[in-house]
Image: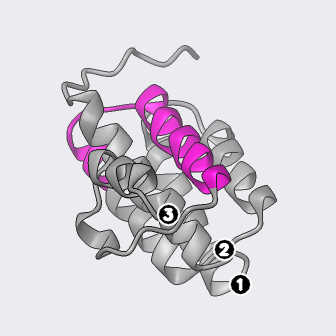
Amino acid sequence: MSSKPSSCNVEEKLLFDHGTRIGVAALIDRVARSQIENIIASLDTVEGREALLVTAAFARRQAKRNKVGTKMANFIVKALLELYEKGCGKEEARKVLGFAKWIYEIEFTPRVNVERLTLQEYLKQLASPGR
């Protein structure tokens, strides 16, 4: 069974901002890199757009099992649910989660409220003198 292309109409900025928040939350929660990779891989356990919902549920399960932090899981649920409701599919979810992994690998935790963190704000803090 082939999955239909998504009818997603979101700006990539939204994807990058969600990824930034998830990646920073992973650093704050001290999540193992392998757990981020497991969450990305969980997108492939189901065909179609429902994979976003399954991956969100998997993230919450991993938080309950203390494999990832609650903050990170909550950001994943929020991002994937928003994407699903906007008609997006695995491609956009993969961008968000892959970008989250990039941010995580930078190993920089900004001094801001992660709830409102954007990629632009993150980069400004990363580039600030004295960092």
Of circles 2 and 3, the one toward us is 3
Q: Earlier in the sequence, mark 3 or mark 1?
A: 1
* CA neighbours of label 2 inside 10 A, class few (<14), some (14 to 19), many (20+): some
Tell me the magenta residue range.
81-106
Q: Magenta-highlighted stretch: main secondary structure?
A: helix
Residue 125 image point, x, y percent:
37, 58
Whether residue 122 is situated above or below residue 3 in the rendered picture? below
- Numbered label attached to residue 102: none
SS for dot 3:
loop
For this view, does 56 lie left or right of residue 63? left
Residue under label 1: 65
The answer to whether marks 1 and 2 mark residues whose Cβ atoms lie closer than 8 Å is yes
Q: Quadrant of residue 44?
A: top right
Indicate the amino acid at tag 1: Arg
Indicate the amino acid at tag 2: Gln
Whether residue 121 is situated above or below residue 97 in the rendered picture? below
Q: Is residue 7 magenta?
A: no
Residue under label 2: 62
Instruction: Give the distance between the C-alpha atoms of the residues marked 2 and 3, in whole angstroms.
Output: 33 Å
Residue 5 image point, x, y percent:
38, 15
Of circles 3 and 1, the one toward us is 3
* CA neighbours of label 3 inside 10 A, class few (<14), some (14 to 19), many (20+): few
Residue under label 3: 131
Q: Is residue 88 magenta?
A: yes
The answer to whether marks 3 and 1 mark residues whose Cβ atoms lie closer than 8 Å is no
SS for dot 1:
loop
**Relative depth, front residue between 93 and 48:** 93
For this view, does 103 lie left or right of residue 12? right
